């Protein structure tokens, strides 16, 4: 399907376009609902000139959810050329707080999925896509607090730079400063967090393809080109996400096979850490940091090191779910208490108001950090029948996020008075 958003209805640049939104559409896809009829309906509205800018953004997201990322982004680009301000569904016509999210024009996983955090609340969410070279709406939409939701990816750097240029004169509190977000990139984070007692984060080194080929040709060793890092290592293409191209490489022969399968020119290389527990299983945790306080988000258990929640088989194992439930219910006196000092220092160094860490525990008991970012998905989409312990924990996170926004807005109002 070719993008056809040139027929979108005209809308004033300072008016927020209503949309179905990220949270509702993603939940439909998560539940296996057929989105094709809705896609066809939105396409017809665009073709006959009755679509709004919000319809166009919903069509872009649905297209991406159905696996056509290129077309979805093309539709989004055409919509954003005309309109960049969107209002998400709000649970009340008279919101108690107005939040402005500053986003980048990137694929659906490149901005903080903030709708999940504010869904079904009395907080109004308006999203402004910051497109470098294009003027911001004037005046800005009314808001009590703003938050940057663009990620640390290369594609977001121009938008982050533009927001950073405007940050000093922003009329309201601006959370998640862009200058802090860019420090989350893999080859910067280990430097930022290095030396924290009780925390282990392997150095992530950028290595070029030509250098790795020299290792294969025995012109040099891996430590020569990877700042002392030797096999076994974890390797991934620089800039890749969601585990694309991620592999454990044990020796030169495995490296050769890996390079024959990928044509990328730059890679991230890091020391492999065997974090298996005594029972041979690997446990990976997601922890949310909101206003400096850590909260349990999920726990994945698998017999392989490269765990994602969706490949860990949590739905199929009652024993795994019981362990995850225990992790959540005892977090403050268990995991959170064991790593309180490391988490406190980590939060201070990262310096963001809201972010997420994916982590584990080493065999010696240290907190092992895989990554930190501000765009990981934190949601309440899982079946409450299968995961009855999740809704209360997710609500705790949502409440903490809302309280943080309210606190920053109130502090600003007191200072202004």
Image: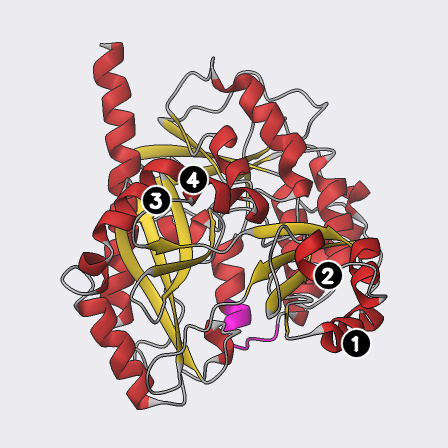
Q: Secondary structure beneath disc 4?
A: strand
Query: Which residue has dot 2 on it?
Result: 221
Q: Say which quarter of the image contains residue 192.
A: top left
CB under 8 Å between discs 1 and 3 = no
Residue 390 in view of the camera: yes
In the image, what residue occupies the spot 31% across and 35% down?
405
Q: Nearer the viewer, mark 1 or mark 4?
A: 1
Mark found first going from the N terminus, 2 or 3: 2
Query: Which residue has dot 1 on it?
Result: 257
Q: Nearer the viewer, mark 3 or mark 4?
A: 3
Q: Nearer the viewer, mark 1 or mark 3?
A: 1
Q: Nearer the viewer, mark 2 or mark 4?
A: 2
Q: Secondary structure beneath disc 1?
A: helix
Q: Which mark is residue 179?
A: none
Classify mark 3: residues with Cα within 10 Å, few (<14), some (14-19) or many (20+).
many
Q: Quadrant of the N terminus?
A: bottom right
Mark found first going from the N terminus, 1 or 4: 4
Q: Which mark is residue 346?
A: 3
CB under 8 Å between discs 2 and 4 = no
Q: Position of residue 14 (x, y in %)?
A: 57, 25
Q: CA distance from mark 1 to mark 2?
A: 17 Å
Q: Which mark is residue 125?
A: 4
Q: CA distance from mark 1 to mark 4?
A: 48 Å
Classify mark 2: residues with Cα within 10 Å, few (<14), some (14-19) or many (20+).
some
Q: CA distance from mark 3 to mark 4?
A: 29 Å
Mark found first going from the N terminus, 1 or 2: 2
CB under 8 Å between discs 2 and 3 = no
Q: Position of residue 252 (x, y in %)?
A: 74, 72
In the image, what residue occupies the spot 59% across and 70% down?
232
Question: 11 or 209, which is in the foreground?
Answer: 209
- Decide whether residue 31 is among the magenta residues: yes
Q: Which residues are magenta?
A: 28-34
């Amino acid at each position: 399907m070719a993008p056809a958003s040139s027929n979108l209805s005209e809308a004033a640049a300072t008016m927020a376009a209503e949309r179905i939104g990220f949270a509702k559409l993603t939940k439909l896809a998560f539940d296996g609902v057929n989105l094709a009829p809705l896609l066809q309906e939105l396409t017809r509205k665009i073709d006959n000139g009755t679509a709004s800018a919000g319809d166009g953004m919903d069509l872009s997201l649905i297209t991406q959810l159905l696996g056509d990322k290129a077309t979805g982004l093309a539709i989004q680009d055409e919509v954003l050329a005309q309109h960049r301000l969107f209002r998400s569904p709000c649970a009340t016509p008279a919101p108690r707080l107005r939040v402005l999210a500053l986003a980048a024009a990137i694929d659906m996983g490149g901005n903080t999925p903030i709708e999940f955090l504010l869904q079904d609340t009395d907080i109004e969410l308006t999203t402004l896509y910051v497109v470098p070279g294009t003027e911001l709406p004037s005046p800005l939409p009314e808001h009590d607090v703003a938050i940057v939701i663009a990620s640390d990816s290369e594609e977001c750097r121009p938008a982050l730079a533009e927001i950073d240029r405007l940050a000093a004169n922003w009329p309201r509190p601006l959370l998640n400063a862009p200058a802090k977000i860019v420090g989350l990139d893999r080859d910067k984070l280990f430097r930022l967090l290095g030396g924290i007692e009780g925390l282990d984060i392997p150095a992530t080194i950028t290595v070029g393809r030509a250098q790795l080929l020299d290792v294969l040709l025995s012109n040099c060793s891996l430590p020569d080109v990877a700042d002392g890092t030797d096999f076994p290592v974890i390797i991934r293409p620089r800039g890749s996400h969601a585990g694309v191209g991620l592999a454990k490489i044990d020796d030169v022969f495995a490296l050769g096979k890996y390079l024959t399968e990928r044509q990328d020119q730059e890679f991230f290389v890091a020391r492999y850490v065997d974090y298996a527990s005594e029972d041979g299983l690997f446990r990976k945790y997601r922890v949310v940091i909101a206003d400096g306080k850590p909260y349990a988000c999920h726990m994945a258990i698998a017999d392989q090191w490269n765990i994602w929640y969706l490949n860990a088989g949590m739905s199929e194992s009652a024993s795994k779910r019981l362990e995850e439930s225990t992790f959540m219910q005892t977090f403050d006196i268990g995991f959170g208490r064991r790593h309180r000092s490391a988490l406190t220092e980590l939060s201070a160094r990262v310096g963001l108001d809201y972010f997420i860490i994916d982590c584990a525990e080493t065999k010696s008991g240290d907190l092992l950090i895989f990554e930190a970012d501000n765009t990981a998905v934190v949601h309440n989409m899982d079946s409450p029948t299968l995961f009855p312990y999740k809704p209360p924990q997710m609500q705790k996170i949502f409440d903490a996020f809302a309280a943080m926004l309210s606190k920053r807005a109130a502090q600003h109002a007191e200072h202004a008075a």
